[in-house]
Amino acid sequence: MKKPMKRESPKAGMAANPKPPLLFLHVVLLSILLLQITASPEAQAEALVKWKNTLAALPPSSPLTSWSIANLNNLCNWTSIVCDSTGTVSEITVSGANLSGTLAHFNFTPFLNLTRFDLSHNYLTGPIPSEIGRLTELQYLSLPFNYLNGKIPYQITNLQKVHYLDLGSNRLLNLDWSKFLAMPLLTHLSFYDNYGLTSGFQGLYFIVTT
């Protein structure tokens, strides 16, 4: 005589298979933890040093002299760097520092809280990486008076908090500049004197006041 099959209670099945919301919560918490590690001051300092090491030789008087692995724990005291209350980088301002290189090796990912990015008046070449669109907290972007070329990445329009955008005096190519008008806080936009743009775009510069 066959014994009746033992039916598994609903509660036992629930215990064996965690509720989807609980799994989702674990995934979210893990993602937040990984994000915090990626955007930590240590990760930011390492990213800056790695980019610095791809640039042409810098003189001893360079403002980037303090950017060093040996000085990793003093990120907020580095020249040209400003930190927020959390100890992470909020501003990078390296203007007129005779930097020669590209942005290709600049890792934008750790700088989630960056509000100001100013590399104007240098000798930077190559395209503007599309990854710049990850800087969603950015308010001020200034890259004029370099030798940047190629198309301006449309990902810049993801920077919805930017109010100041200057890409003038480079060698950037044509694009539909009207897309930038959809950036709600934009009050200053300049593509002035870009050798890669047609004459109608070379002088594009406007200020919006409210």
Image (cartoon, grey):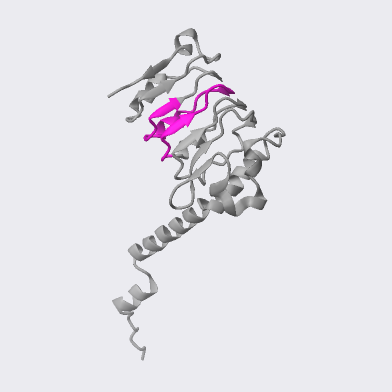
Q: x, y (%) of residue 100?
A: 66, 29
Q: Which residues are magenta?
A: 136-165
* Residue reaching furthest to the top: 199
154 magenta-colored: yes
Number of numbered discs overlaid on the protein picture:
0
* Residue reaching furthest to the bottom: 1
In front of the other: 93 or 22: 93
Work out which quarter of the rendered image holds the C terminus and state it.
Answer: top left
In front of the other: 33 or 16: 33
Q: x, y (%) of residue 181?
A: 35, 23
Q: x, y (%) of residue 188?
A: 39, 23
35 magenta-colored: no
Q: Is residue 145 above or below residue 90?
A: above
Work out which quarter of the rendered image holds the N terminus and state it.
Answer: bottom left
**Point 54% across, 27% down: residue:** 120
Q: x, y (%) of residue 14?
A: 33, 73
Q: Quadrant of residue 147?
A: top right
**Point 43% across, 32% down: residue:** 140
Q: Is residue 170 left or right of residue 154?
A: right
Q: Is residue 25 left or right of residue 50?
A: left
* Residue reaching furthest to the left: 210
In front of the other: 184 or 122: 122
**Point 44% across, 27% down: residue:** 165
